[in-house]
Image (tube, rainbow, N blue to C red):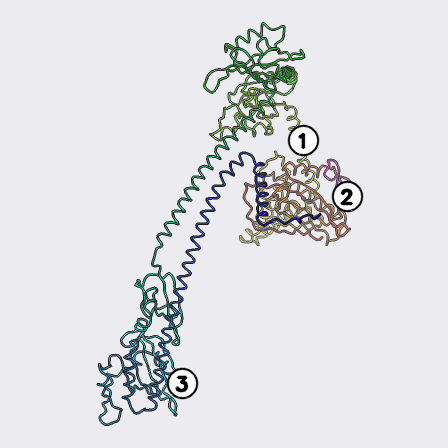
Amino acid sequence: MVFPATLPPSPGQRRAQAGGQTSRLFWRWWRRQSPSQQDRYATLGPLVSVLLFLAAIIAAFWYLRNEELEREQEAVKRDTEVVQQQVRLRLLENQEQLTRIARETTLRPAQLAPFLQQAGDFIRSRPELVGVAWVTADRQIRAARSTLSLPLDASTLSINPAGSPGATPLVPSDIYDPFKDAQEPVEAFRLAKDRLQPSYSYPFRNATGARVIQVHIPVLERSGVNGTIVAEYALDPLMRYLVPQEIASRHAMSLVTLDGTALTGYVGIDKDSAARPTFVHEVVVTPVGNGLILRGMGFRTSSNLIGNTLFWMVVALSVLTVWTLMGTLRHMRRRTEIQKTLVQETNFRRAMENSMLTGMRTIDLEGRITYVNPAFCAMTGFSEEELIGCVPPYPYWPKDRLDEFNRMFQQELLGRSPMGGIEVVMQRRDGSQFDARLYVSPLIDAQGDQTGWMTSVTNITEAKRVRDQLTAAHERFTTVLEGLDAAVSVVSVQRGELLFANRSYRLWFGANPDAHAQLTGGEVMPDEIIDGDESVDDFGGLPTQALTTAGSDTREVFLDGAQKWFDVRARYIQWTDGNLAQMLIATDITDRKMAEDAAARQAEKAQFTSRLITMGEMASTVAHELNQPLAAISNYCSGLISRVQNGNIDNEQLVGALEKTARQAQRAGQIIHRIRQFVKRSEPQRQPCRVRDITDAVTDLAMFEMKRRRVTLNTVVANRLPQLSADPILIEQVLLNLLKNAAEAIDTANMPQSRRTIDLRVQQRRTEEQGDVVEFTVTDSGPGMKEDMLARLFEAFHSTKAEGLGIGLSLCRSIIESHHGRIKAENLYNDSVTVGCRFSFTLPIDPQVTADAAPPHSNNLQADNP
């Protein structure tokens, strides 16, 4: 049995199958879209179709317009080339005729009549010619014929050859002169002679002012060029007679130069010369060349009113359709947004009702339950089906309180429920009870009619338990505050009223809020509120976050009424009523202040004692220094007495000796004044002081010790150091102590003279901890100190000297730290060998003082060699 072969599907069947598959895919995709997206696509479809139709119409009109413009451009190009060929053929024809005349002239060079006859016939049949001339090799016109000299009849020509009997000579005024007032013919004449071929000149104006060109045909003889035949073309007649009428009816033609200068007017359709042509095509005029361009111009003669009207009607209708569709799209979008908002609001209400912990119950005017939310069901333990439609008594009413609930229910139906809510005890399904608070409000429909009552139920069992615990905690907290030795008070910022005061506050100050204001310096209202933004309500009851989270303000206050010192800490808090309040804690520090005063007095005595000890150690040196001026005074006085007794002194010598005596006395007085100023006991005083004054005073005092121990002191003070806010006597004490210790270390170690030096350097620098400081550095070249001694160097009663008390460097550290400075010591090393020790301390700079403008100072003190 033979089965028929399966035939492949035809192209039509394949297209039908592909179309069906595409349709199924489209509807499958369409069904997956949401209704809002389907509405959006259904609205955007017509809009896209209209936009595509409008784009197709615009593209079609644009294509047709471009096609029309291209045809017009091709037409202008074609007509311009036709005119070019007409001009070219005419010029070549004339050139051949002139060449023939030149050959005949060569055959009969002595006869002028044949040339004039031929020239006249040549000009008469060619209106574009101005004239023809026979020019000799030396550029002399032998014969010429122009349109103005043509006879009406050729038979009247009576010009005989030159030199023949009866010849009539040519009058120069009657001769056509091709070289008059132009250089272009001369150049063409030269080219024709040189190249032995026809040559055209550049366009120029002739004697009559017309635009012309010339062609020069060389007259060749056996001996060479014997001149040229010159023909002059007028450009305007050339274009007027050679442009065909059918071309002139379509387009305008003109001759121009390379730079666009017009040589002739428009020949063709009637257009204003100032009008701009739509299409332009330019070609070179051959065989002339020489910058002569033929320009063809086309003008749009029709406005294509019907096509433009149709186009703009289609555009206007398309725009109207797009506008209508856009309005429909906006309307659909608005409806979609409203629908979406409604769905979101419904979902939000449902989610809020399902997630809130407050139970909601709705009853109608007859008391029948019409709605309960999940929170109410979870609160009572009954399901929604069990509660909907119930009438009093409700299943969640306790059995033992039915009368009480009935009275409250009747008040609820009458609208007499209190605004603050009602506290009741409700019963769950399992029989357990819980405390609840009920709030009742009328339920109003869209027409403004009351349809029932809405009741919100809140479980307050945990809240009551927390409230009881807070009450107990408050009682315990109050008991603790009452037992404190510090005074605790709270004052309202807005009203200035004393809100709380513990037992210590009442014992010391009574129930008066004035003591609170005195302890805080009279600033109960914060500056942030007094000078704050006017748009913020100062007494709105809500404290700002910046005030309630700020740290406490600490100060020490002395009250005359209580004769006590208090350490006061104040901060702003939010009181229980939500308003802003200021809390103050005042601790009695009278005993501590007395102890601090006693310690300060002891420190002052220790400092004074240290200075006395320092001067006691330098007593022999000071006595030696004082002995020199006193001995000098004694010698001067003894010498004066003896010379006065002998009578061999005059007044001038007497005055000189007295002046020397006075200077020595002043020197002794300055030494005594400096020592007295240093050891004088006085209260520490912080005052602006110059760094140079401190260093000068110290170097004057240290000079005695340096000389005694044969040590050189090198002092370098930086330029323009700022003033310091410090006690100058205390800083001098620290600096002198460091210099004296350095000199003792060098002298005790018996260092050689080359290493018996101390460097004192003062400069300004910046540190990370203190900022801008003035640093004092004392560097010696002694043996240094052991590392274990450096760690305990500034401890009290620890000394590196056998006879030392151990209070000098400890006092130095106390003085520097009281000035908010830092002091340190370190050894100097050269590889692993100790080559000296360096003490340095810093003092902070007061930014309000001015810089010291004194020049840099350097001083070297060399000990006297014994």
How crowded pointer 3 is (Cα within 10 Å; few <14, some 14-19, many 20+) is rated as some
The answer to whether residue 554 is seen in the rendering is no
Residue 153 location, x and y as percent?
A: 22, 82
Task: Please state which amino acid type lies under the numbered disc 3.
Answer: Leu
* Mark 3 touches mark 1? (CB < 8 Å): no
Q: Viewed as shown, does residue 688 lie left or right of 825?
A: left
Q: Is residue 797 magenta?
A: yes
Residue 413 location, x and y as percent?
A: 52, 10
Closer to the camera in the image, 512 or 31: 31
Q: Measuring 55% from the left and 6% from the top, which residue is drawn there?
A: 407
| Helix, strand or loop: magenta stretch | loop
Q: Quadrant of residue 577?
A: top right
Task: Please state which amino acid type lies under the numbered disc 1.
Answer: Gln
Name the residue tied to disc 1: 602
**Which mark is first along the chain, 1 or 2?**
1
Q: Which residues are magenta?
A: 789-802
How crowded pointer 1 is (Cα within 10 Å; few <14, some 14-19, many 20+) is rated as few
* Mark 3 touches mark 2? (CB < 8 Å): no
Q: Quadrant of residue 507?
A: top right
Residue 714 location, x and y as percent?
A: 66, 51
Closer to the camera in the image, 276 or 643: 276
**Which mark is first along the chain, 1 or 3?**
3
Q: Separation of disc 3 and disc 2 at Cα?
A: 119 Å
Name the residue tied to disc 3: 196
**Which mark is first along the chain, 2 or 3?**
3
Q: Measuring 56% from the left and 34% from the top, which residue is drawn there?
A: 34
Name the residue tied to disc 2: 787
Residue 5 location, x and y as percent?
A: 67, 49
Question: Which type of secondary structure does the marked residue at label 2 adopt?
Answer: helix
